[in-house]
Image (spheres, helix red, strand yellow):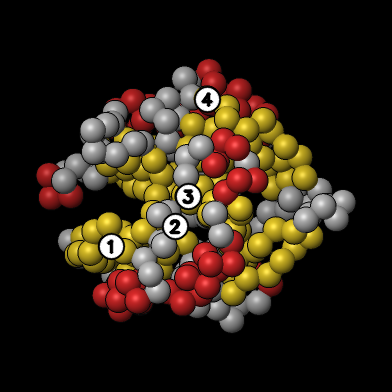
Amino acid sequence: MLTTRFTDGAPDWMDLGTPDLEGAADFYTALFGWEYEAGGPETGGYGMFTLNGRTTGGVMTVPEDQAAASWSVYFQSGDAEATARTVEKAGGSALFPPMDVLEYGRMGGFHDPAGACFGVWQPRANPGLGVVGDPGSLCWAELYTPDVPAAAAFYSAVFGWETARTPYPGGDGAYTVIRTAGGGQDAGFGGLVPLDAVPVRAAQGPHWLPYIEVGDCDATVAEVERLGGKLTLEPLEMADVGTFADVTDPFGAAFAVIRSATRPGS
């Protein structure tokens, strides 16, 4: 379960790269009730999304000729340089090396051996996301990968993650849950999924997919479509998990929404 008491290896940040910053801000503020805080020249225009004063993620302009619109997930590191070295040793590569983000922390971007992008955030003044697990915030993260055991071995080497196989309801296969090191069952924050298990995800290639908690999955999907986004995976209800769906924003950035079966405080 995600909390804002971040430990090393836990998702502690996410951000959106989009070709249309104003359009994306309009979409997400309408969809989730977020507020958009524009970044100044000292941040290169990197802005923030917040919910009731708590940060839900970052956003920046990425021209279409440089990269497709996408959400990126970052994991906490106590030493971004050491993590970068471990990534390389384990067979990954750097998208951009660790760098200072003013006084807020250090950020680095990487590819795992299969090509999925992920980031690391070494907190200083900014500890990371201000809210997780509540409606309108990050609650889960999935990696779609062509080789689940290889991915588990890579991320275990980099972050010390542990994995557990959880049978699907009905006994048809199992889901690989990922946990931070030593946290036990309650430390699960995401999963590893075979790339070919979901055709729409396979079409995107190896990638991380963030899940946003919502109060009503069907209503949120309808609002995504009303606002110009697209439904890419029909809402699915799964016992003891909840109801979830995959969508994209109007510019093609993919994310999932879920009304979890259980939430903190529920």
Distance in Å between CA atoms under marks 1 and 4: 31 Å
Q: Position of residue 163 (x, y in %)?
A: 63, 71
Judged by depth in the image, the label closer to the viewer, 4 or 2, is 2
Q: Quadrant of the N terminus?
A: bottom right
Where is residue 213? Give x, y as percent: 59, 45
Indicate which disc, 1 or 2, sits on the residue closer to the N terminus. 1
Label disc, if present, on residue 105 of the rendered structure: none
Amino acid type indicated by mark 3:
Pro
Looking at the rendered structure, which numbered label has been put on residue 94? 1
The residue closer to the viewer here, 38 or 11, is 11
Any mark on residue 206, and which? 3
The first of marks 4 and 2 along the sequence is 2
Q: What residue does disc 4 label?
A: 230
Could you tell me which residue is drawn at 82 percent across and 52 percent down?
Answer: 172
Circle 4 packing at 10 Å, graded few (<14), some (14-19), many (20+), is: many
Element marked by disc 3: loop
- Please state the total of marks drawn on the protein image: 4
Q: Which residue was labeled with disc 2? A: 114
Residue 36: image quadrant is top left
Sequence-first tag of 2 and 3:
2
Q: CA distance from mark 4 to mark 3?
A: 20 Å
- Residue depicted at x 35% and y 32%: 25
Marks 1 and 4 close (CB-CB < 8 Å): no
For the residues marked 2 and 3, what is the alpha-carbon distance in whole angstroms?
7 Å
Q: What secondary structure is marked by label 1?
A: strand
